[in-house]
Image: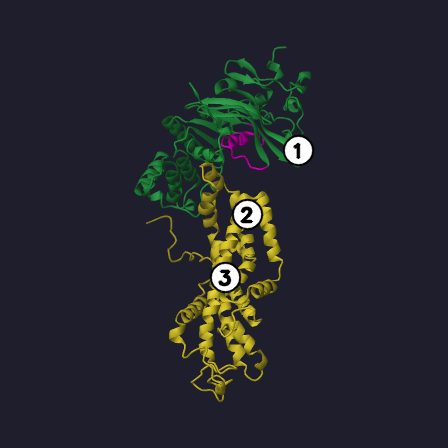
Chain colours: A yellow, B green
Amino acid sequence: MSVIALPDRAARPEPRTRGRRVPVVSIGIIAVFVLIALLAPLLSPGDPYEQSLRLRFRPPVWEERGSWAHPLGTDRLGRDMLTRIIWGSRVSLAVGALAVLLAGAVGATVGLVAGYYGGRVDAALMRITDATLSFPVILLALILAVTVGPSFSNVVIAIAVILWARYARVIRGQVLTLMTLDFIAQARIAGAGAWRIITRHLLPNTLNTLVVLVTLQVGYVIIVEASLSFLGAGIPPPTPAWGSMIAEGRDVVTSAWWVSFLPGLAILLVVLAFNLLGDWLRDTLDPKLRQL
Amino acid sequence: MPAVIDVRDLRTHIVTRWGTIKAVDGVSFALGEGETLGLVGESGSGKSMTCLSIVRLVPRPAARIVGGEVLLDGDDLLTKTDDEMQRIRGRKVAMILQDPMSSLNPVFSIGMQMREPLTMYHGLRGRAVVARAAELLASVSIPAPAARLRAFPHQLSGGMRQRVVGAMAIAGPPRLLMADEPTTSLDLTIQAQYLGLLKELQQRHRFAMIFVTHNLGIVARTCDRVAVMYAGRIVEIGPVRRIFTQPAHPYTRALLESIPRFGARRERLAAIAGQPPDLATLAAGCAFAPRCPAAFDRCVEAPPETEVVPGHATRCWLHVPA
């Protein structure tokens, strides 16, 4: 008989899982919208540009006067709302992904260089970063979009120009702490140059943070893009974009609420999903970023 | 025996808001193949700065090497270009730092990190890298080296990690290995093992070794010669046995008296009175004079280096013939 009673495996407390449960709903919503965007030509019931002035302001199917011909109703020019929302997801997601990646690449580079070299390089780069951050986002994007003219690539660039600074600041802060660790000194002593240290040692150690930031900002970018489109400085009409669709329905909210509300709901769903996913990623990968 | 490393009158200054600090102030020593020098002294005495100056990695722009020569196999490192220097670091001069917990990159496996020096120094690729990395790990007595290559730093103990750092340091293999308090954060039994390992590697590769520590016990066990630093200068240098039995400088004597001895009469340990000097406001004379029990009027001038016996030198007026 054993003298020491070993605790039963089942009796031991379950190992605590890090962070919260996987946000299945968020991932689901994002996956659905990504699929919709990718398969827009197959999924959409009609042509997003096809107008029919006789069928203006048709309500969604569940309302009186609604019909299955236009399940989510029609807008001021009689265009099918469902089709336009489906095609609009392309714009929102593409702008979101591209702007965030562009801003992330620029910002991370600036942050890595500033943190690695320090001194005057750091001071100069961080002043530029501060200047960018001190600008009202929408105003700057408006100025940029208006001066270079509204188009898809200009919207992406305008949003990236205002967003890179956040990445630069967070990454630089992290690089500063990494630089005090011995493995950087050890790499230097082993004969590694600036490029090798930045790409092999600093960047991989900031990837978690980058992933979290990117995810959290996709939602934000979608809102900025929608705001720009709403203000007429975004994707030029008649291209369907959620922001400009909201703007188009602005005057008729009381009589034809669906024209503004439905694209707004789409924005809400996508942004909320990205934010929840970002929160979860942050808690799982990088709890130090809690203040963001 | 020709010197592997010959440091002559090395001077490194740090410019601060409060004035220029002479962190390394005319340090000279030479080391042959397979020889070990213990560099001892209080915190801030310039031990680490001396090592960093040898590989020219002093924290710029505040710190600057302002003079002297660092001859590695007769070649002055201070006149090398940055690119040349980068190729010398790691290949010819390696260094092991104090903290094994942070001296490995946390996001890469041991194998991936070991690949770096091997491809950089020897241009090894593919299977050859893995084989050589496992060989290096085996040479620092890591059991099951091939399996360890897949481990990440957090899966290894402090002693193991420091061994991995050691394995990477000898990838060159270097002509000079500098160890900056490599065992301070290891527990005692592991310390002894690690010191034994370093000696073993040294015998195999015949590199010269500089051992930075403030633990005189380690010096006694591992070093051939010892240099005592105070305020950026070497105040005494000589063979370990000689320094431990017949220290010439009052500071060395005080250091030795502050070690507890087993079986000695029970009495209070002798502490050195006063504080280490503020290097920014250092007077011209002997830096130790204000704390020195034997200080006299000549100490207001800087003492010259004087040989007590051949191979044992000190900077103290007590040993300068009047």
Check chain identity for marks 1 and 2: say if they share one: no
Q: Which residues are drawn in magenta?
A: B41-61
Q: Chain of mark 1?
A: B
Q: Position of residue B304 (x, y in %)?
A: 60, 17
* Residue under numbered circle 1: B19
Residue A268 in view in this figure: no
Above or below, A5 against A155 in this view is above
Residue density around tag 3, few if under 14, some if 14–19, many if 20 or more, within 10 Å: many
* Residue under numbered circle 3: A99
Looking at this rendering, what residue extends furthest in the front direction?
A148
Above or below, A150 against A46 in this view is above
Q: CA distance from mark 3 to mark 1?
A: 48 Å
Nearer-the-camera pick, B271 or B15: B15
Name the amino acid, label 2: Ala
Relative side of B296 to B172, left or right: right
Nearer-the-camera pick, A145 or A113: A145
Q: CA distance from mark 1 to mark 2?
A: 27 Å
Q: Chain of mark 2?
A: A
Looking at this rendering, what residue extends furthest in the right direction?
B297
* Residue under numbered circle 2: A114
Q: Position of residue A186 (x, y in %)?
A: 47, 38
Secondary-structure class at tag 3 = helix
Residue density around tag 2, few if under 14, some if 14–19, many if 20 or more, within 10 Å: many
Camera-side mark, 3 or 1: 3
Secondary-structure class at tag 2 = helix
Residue density around tag 1, few if under 14, some if 14–19, many if 20 or more, within 10 Å: few
Q: Chain of mark 3?
A: A
Check chain identity for marks 3 and 1: say if they share one: no
